[in-house]
Amino acid sequence: MEWNLRPIPEPSPMDTHKTYTLEDLDRLEFHGTPLAVLGDPVEHSLSPVMHNTAISKLAQTDQHFKDWAYYRFTVPAVELSSALQGFYSKGFEGVNLTVPHKVLALKTVTDLSGDAMAMGAVNTLKRGDDGWLGYNTDGYGLERGLLATLGQSLKGSVVMLAGSGGAARAAAVQCLLSGCKKLYLGNRTPERLGELREILAALGKLMEVEVFSLAALPEDLPKVGIFINATSLGLRGDDPSPIEVQALPSDWVAYDMVYNPPQTQLLTAAASRGMKCANGLSMLVYQGARALEIWTGQTVDATVMRNAAEAALAKKERESSDA
């Protein structure tokens, strides 16, 4: 009797361009070594194309990474805790967290890195033996991004930061740790900055911090400074600028953490005044490269990730123009 033995086919890879839901997580199998970004909204995220391109390059010289893949999941805030348990049970090696999860996730991690503990927020989780290990690469990404796109160093600079969420927490701590001269913290309701002030108080640098309402910028601003938008204003095309840009001195520079869409109302207003400005793509790239290094233990080429992200944005713009 002859046996007609056929090789068992490898599982088909999942579509990394799709935006998945928690229902998909329950009913589908994500084979190999899966990674993901979780957020709400998250459809705009360029992280999958960026990370998967970098993973493909790693796999060219190390077959260990040939079955790694990075996905995108919509996860409502109220379901984050149970969702993270689900991703852990499904064998995900790591996840990135975006709006609105960076502070909420603190309740579900088993351990925090020093930077995440200082910032009071996490954006990168790595699989540990007993649960998720929390890291924060946002501060690193911001500092590298400002230098790469605007030639600005946080050290010795006056910085005005808008926002009080996870990204703002990371940015504020990074500003102080890097030695900024003065930090203005703004929010639509200054009362919400209370928790952030407590975090900064632990650094012993509150003398360098001033809180204000975004509706009225501080008076007597110095001639030169850096404005950073760490709010979610700009994610939607009709979002207004978080501040009245005309109130800033003309020699200030503007950095918007929003990168998709690439041109926000803040950046449009800043450019119309001749101010140097940039969106948050560079921050995304550098924080993503650092996260991938944490997961893989390898050095990651940030240029590869940036090229992939820029190509994806250009494609989206062409498709929008043709529509």
Image (cartoon, rainbow, N blue to C red):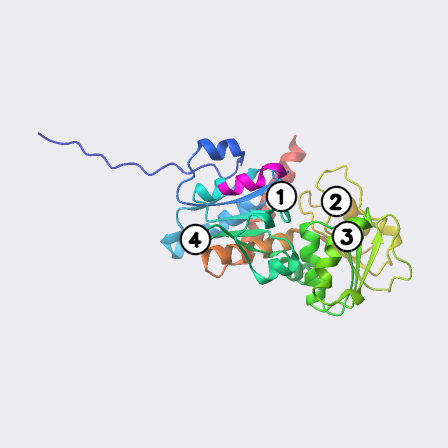
Could you give the CA–CA distance between mark 3 and mark 2, rounded to whole angstroms? Answer: 24 Å
Q: Secondary structure at mark 1?
A: helix
Please tell me which residue lies in front, 41 or 13: 41
Identified by mark 2, the residue type is Thr
Nearer-the-camera pick, 15 or 124: 124
Q: Residues within 10 Å of mark 1 (few under 14, many from 20)?
A: few
> Pointer 1: what residue?
314
Q: Which residue is mark 2?
A: 264
Magenta extent: 75-85
Asked if residue 32 is positioned above or below residue 282 in the image, the reply reads: above
Tell me which corner region of the image, top left, top right, bottom left or bottom right, holds residue 232.
top right
Amino acid under label 3? Leu
Question: Residue visible at 73% across and 47% down?
Answer: 231
Q: Earlier in the sequence, mark 4 or mark 2?
A: 4
Local SS, label 4: loop
Q: Earlier in the sequence, mark 4 or mark 3?
A: 4
Quarter of the picture containing the C terminus is: top right
Counting residues from the start of the chain, the first of labels 3 and 1 encountered is 3
Which of pointers 2 and 1 indicates the residue nearer the eye? Answer: 2
Look at mark 4 in the image and give the residue it sits on. Answer: 129
Q: Which residue is mark 3?
A: 193
